[in-house]
Amino acid sequence: MTATTTQAAAIVGHRDAKAGALILKAGKAAATMLQSCKEAAQLAAAQLNPATPIGQRISDVVALYSADFTAAGHNVRALFVDALTLHAAAQTPVTVSAIVDGKKADVHVTAADAVNMPKHAMRDAAKQVREAIGTARKPAAKKAAPKMPAAPAAPDMTVTAGEIDGFTQWLANFDAYFTDAVFHQKILARIVDAGFVVSKAAAGRKITGKASA
């Protein structure tokens, strides 16, 4: 024997004139805005169609009152949607902050119970419900900060002991190399390649050295 399930009958949405009037009233009277939005959502909840996914179910009803929200304002729409969401997922468990015996405490209630709570608790409950039913807004992806070009590496100005010794030795032998018949030509060729020009301090200096033999 197989169990059978009874499918809920589809509901054709229509604008409830009383709910629309309460939305407009909420927009004009800030002092009673929250209560009017709650009452409007309770009436409009009768238009929630159980044959559609819950997210669409809520948005379809909200769309019925789009003209009323245009006149009443964004704040009224936000409160109405929060209250309607709690009605749509009435049995969803939520945890809200409330005053118990004069002290602030976390209270575990159903979404339906949260509709009758103060504004902050009601809105917090609606947020939890949206996360539970998968209709919460996804956070916008953060743009990666542009990478700054890497600063050029500072030249290594450190002189090692070996470099000092090598230069000292070269400098001590410079005169012998520069005046040598073979080494002199090689030095001049290297100097020219490097873009420098050599001029004599005194003419007729004799080229000598071991390599001249």
Image (cartoon, grey):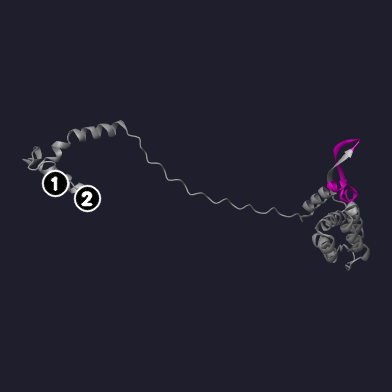
Left/right of residue 211 with respect to residue 50 in the rendered view: left
Left/right of residue 123 with respect to residue 183 in the rendered view: right
- Secondary structure beneath dot 1 equals helix
Residue in view at x 81 percent, y 48 percent: 124
Q: CA distance from mark 1 to mark 2?
A: 12 Å
Look at the image and say whether residue 112 sits in the magenta stretch: yes
Q: The residue under label 2 is which amino acid type?
A: Asp
Whether residue 1 appears in this view of the structure is: no
Q: Is residue 160 above or below residue 118?
A: above
Q: Is residue 13 above or below residue 83?
A: below
Q: Is residue 15 above or below residue 170?
A: below
Image quarter in which the N terminus is found: bottom right
Crowd tier of the residue under label 2, counting other residues whose Cα lies within 10 Å: few below 14, some 14–19, many 20 or above? few
Measured as percent of width and height from the top left, residue 13 is found at: 88, 67
Identify which residue, 56 or 62, lies in the foreground. 62
Residue in view at x 85 percent, y 60 percent: 72
Residue range corresponding to the magenta coloring: 100-121
Left/right of residue 179 with respect to residue 4 in the rendered view: left
Give residue 102's quadrant in the image: top right
Provide the residue designation for mark 2. Answer: 193
Provide the residue designation for mark 1. Answer: 185
Q: The residue under label 1 is which amino acid type?
A: Gln
Identify which residue, 8 or 139, lies in the foreground. 139
* N-terminal-most mark, 1 or 2: 1
- Secondary structure beneath dot 2 equals helix
Look at the image and say whether residue 33 sits in the magenta stretch: no
